[in-house]
Amino acid sequence: MSNPFFSSQVLMEKDFFHLEPQNRRIKVYELPEGMNERQLQELEKVAVKEGCDKIIFYVEADQDKVLRVEKLSFQYEGEIQGFYRGEDAFIYAKYLNRERNTANPENVISAILKMEFRFNANKDLPDGYTARWAKEEDAEEMAELYKKVFPKYPTPINKPEYIKEMMDDQVYFSLIHFEGELVSACSADVFSTYQAAEFTDCATHPSHRGKGLLSYQYPILEEKMKEEGIQTMFSYTRAVSMGMNIITAQQGFTYGGCLVQNSTIGNGLEDMNIWYKSI
C-alpha cells in the first residue's frame, strides 16, 4: 500500500514537488523527512504519468540528507550557494530515460571560466532608450517580444495572461523601450520562503543586441531584490549561449554546475549552466 503522504494530490497541495510538463521534469525544493525508495517509486509513477523523465532534488548541505539522496541513485549536478536563507543547496537529478542524461559537448563554460571579468554595469543607456518597471498593461507587448526571441521557452511566457499571473506572484520585470517600442526585458522571480530570487526571462530583440541592455537592467533588479530582503540571486543560462554566460559572469555571479537537458528553450531540451551570487 502506497504512502498517502506521497499521493500526487497531497504533494501538489503542499508544494512538495513542482510539476513542469513543458520541460518534462519534476522539481522538489524541500526533501520530505524519511524519504525512501518506496516513496521515490511513488514519485516516479507520477512522473511517468505526466510524461516527465527527470526528477530534480534541491538538498540542503546536510550530510544525512545528501547521503539519503545519493542512496536513491540521484547524481549531483551542481549547487546554489546561499539558496536556503543563506544556506547552500545541492542539486541532484535522477533520469528515468538514460538518453536524457547526455550533456551537450558544446557547453561554452570551459571558455568562460578561462576569461577574466570585471563587474560590468552600464550606467547610461544609449540615446533613444528608456527603462522602467513593467505594468500589467505591458503584458501583450512583452508576450510579443518573447515570441520573437524564443521559438520555445520553459514557461508559457508568450501568453499575456501568464505574464500577468507572474506579476501577481512576486516576479518583477524590467523593460527597455526604444522610441516607444519594447526591445528588451528581464525579470527577478522571488522565492520569498528561501530569501532567494532567480534572474531570468532575459530577452533582447535581435536588432538591439550588443548595446548592453541586459547589463543595464540586472543591477536595477539586484537593488530591488535587496529592498525585498533577498540574500541570494541565481540564474540558469543556456549552456551554448556565449552571450548570456558572459553577461552573468560580468555581473559577479559564480558558476555552480550544469543541469543536463534541463529546459525546453531554443530548439528543444537544452543544458543549463547554474550561476549564483550573494547580495
Image: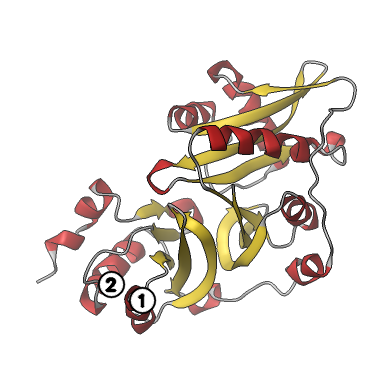
Q: Report the amino acid beneath label 1.
A: Val
Q: Which residue is mark 2?
A: 40
- Using the image, tell me which numbered label, if any, was put on residue 69: 1
Q: How is the image coloured?
A: secondary structure
Looking at the rendered image, the disc whose residue lies closer to the viewer, 2 or 1, is 1
| Residue 81 or residue 78, whichever sits in front | 81
Q: Quadrant of the N terminus?
A: bottom left
At a point 47% along the width and 68% down the height, the residue shown is 90
Secondary structure under the numbered disc 1 in the rendered image: helix
At a point 63% along the width and 23% down the height, the residue shown is 133
Judge whether residue 156 can be spotted in this image: no
Relative placement, left or right, of 202 versus 125 is: left
At a point 30% along the width and 50% down the height, the residue shown is 15
Secondary structure under the numbered disc 2 in the rendered image: helix
| Residue 226 or residue 263, whichever sits in front | 226
Return the x and y of residue 159 as percentages of the image width and height.
54, 31
Q: Residues within 10 Å of mark 1 (few under 14, many from 20)?
A: many
- Using the image, tell me which numbered label, if any, was put on residue 99: none
Return the x and y of residue 147 as percentages of the image width and height.
66, 36
Q: Are marks 2 and 1 in contact (CB under 8 Å)?
A: no
Q: Residues within 10 Å of mark 2 (few under 14, many from 20)?
A: some
Return the x and y of residue 228 as percentages of the image width and height.
49, 34
